[in-house]
Image (tube, rainbow, N blue to C red):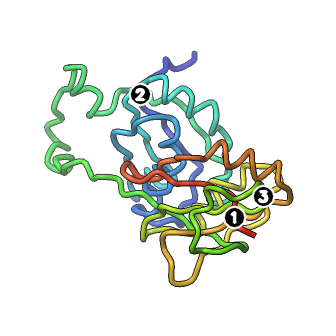
Amino acid sequence: MDIKPTHTIYANNLNEKIKKEELKKSLYAIFSQFGQILDIVAMKTLKMRGQAFVIFKEISSATNALRSMQGFPFYDKPMRLAYSKKDSDVIAKMKGTYQERTKEKKKKKKEPKKVQILYICVCAGGRADDDGSKNPPNHILFLNNLPPETQEEMLNMLFNRFNGFKEVRLVPGRHDIAFVEFEGEQQASEAKGALQGFKISPSNAMKVTFAKK
């Protein structure tokens, strides 16, 4: 029997070697494109290792995320996604159906952690002192408005879904910009259109333009 769609996605088969905070940031980065995320729950206990819950504000966001990201190669392992069998605490509180758990309440009384987001950088060519807004189409994308926490691995996960992806390289000494290289102009254009304004964090939208050659 299929589980009824809920606000919460249960993800498993996750790479167990990834640290909890990095895992949560990375999950936020790839799932935030589908809608507002209220919380991400990941624990490193033996029972919960390799698993996480992603809680969306809207069920439609969870549905789109589940369909689009099923089997997505996340840190070299295909994610397995399903709807959670129960509402998370945060959703239950919104609905007014929340019931306190006496034994676990003290541990769970932590305030929801604000999921910080990763920003990622890359570089393949072009100049780093131009915002790229007027540059003609080519096979290299220029990214800016990236935060200090930018990581190459996260950019790889965002862009390697697109055909023709070649590489991501960070710009030494600059955390806010990066370049991504594709095999051809058309493939770069498709990635640019799909990820333009993508929010890896709640406050920063990534700006994607063509690099200046």
Which element is circle 3 on?
A: strand
Q: CA distance from mark 3 to mark 1?
A: 15 Å
- Which label belongs to residue 165? 3
Which element is circle 1 on?
A: loop
**x, y percent for residue 40:** 38, 46
Foreground label between 3 and 1: 1
Return the residue nearer the eye: 19 or 150. 150
Crowdedness near tag 1: few (<14), some (14–19) or many (≥20) residues, C-alpha within 10 Å: many
**x, y percent for residue 169:** 66, 73
Identity of the amino acid at label 3?
Phe
Return the residue nearer the eye: 61 or 124. 124
Q: CA distance from mark 3 to mark 2?
A: 32 Å
Is the C terminus in the top left, top right, bottom left or bottom right quadrant? bottom right
* Above/below status of 87 relative to 20: above
Q: Which residue carries the number 1 mark?
A: 211
Q: Which residue carries the number 2 mark?
A: 7
Q: What residue lies at 34% left-to-right and 39% top-to-bottom? A: 38
Q: What residue lies at 44% left-to-right and 57% top-to-bottom? A: 25
* Above/below status of 85 relative to 140: above
Foreground label between 1 and 2: 1
- Residue closest to the far front: 134
- Residue closest to the far right: 184
**x, y percent for residue 157:** 63, 56
Identity of the amino acid at label 2?
His
Q: CA distance from mark 1 to mark 2?
A: 39 Å
115 left or right of 24 in image: left
Is the N terminus in the top left, top right, bottom left or bottom right quadrant? top right
84 left or right of 77 in image: left
* Above/below status of 104 relative to 148: above
